[in-house]
Amino acid sequence: MINKKRIKIPTPRTGNFPQQKKYKKYWKLIMIKPILTEKTKDRLYGYLIKLDDMMGDGLHHEPDGKWIKKEYKDVMKALGIGPQLQRKDNTQVINKFMVGRIAAVQCLKCKGKLKQTRSGSTIGKCVDCGARYRLMKIKSKGG
């Protein structure tokens, strides 16, 4: 029989993860693109199976079981599995709308011309005084 140590997986919710402020570079590295060894991957897959069993038993529906879903998502993200969400690119539509909107609207302070701050942005900035105005609102679907 092999003697195995139980090692907690360092995630933000297990509590043994380094402080975010103290180890800011390390934190960003782990959260954006984790560098996983084979040993760490095996541990994470084992933890994922454990969480999956807990969810199969319905423990994530209990009043204090909300952490199970969150941990499951974090481990899936760390392993690089699951849906990869891509943002919808609306820059062409926004830019066309903003051309007409900038021509129609003047600065409220100095009556100067407005200019779009950057491509895909819905904010116009006055060329003369630098005042910024939101010229278009985007409604979110899930909101």
Image (spheres, rainbow, N blue to C red):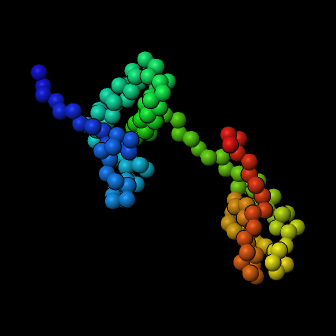
Residue 37: quarter of image? top left
> Farthest residue toward the front?
63
Q: In this view of the protein, can residue 67 be seen by the observer?
A: yes
Q: Say if 28 sits above or below 68 in the image.
A: below
Instruction: Name the residue: 69% across, 68% down.
Output: 117
Which sits in the foreground, 59 or 31? Answer: 59
**Is residue 100 shown above or below 74?**
below
Residue drawn where x is 53% and y is 39% of the image: 84
Where in the figure is residue 60, as x and y percent of width and height? Answer: 46, 26
User: Where in the figure is residue 44, as x and y percent of width and height?
Assistant: 33, 34
* Left/right of residue 66 with respect to residue 125 in the rendered view: left
Looking at the image, how many numbered discs can be counted on the residues?
0
Report x, y in % for residue 97: 81, 58
Pick the quarter of the image with the N terminus: top left
Q: Is residue 118 left or right of residue 28?
A: right
Identify the residue at the far top of this view: 57
Query: Residue 17 versus residue 29: which sits nearer the camera?
Result: 17
Q: Residue, x 46% and y 19% (percent of image)? A: 58
Identify the residue at horizontal 83%, vertical 74% (top origin). Answer: 108
Q: Is residue 72 above or below residue 120?
A: above
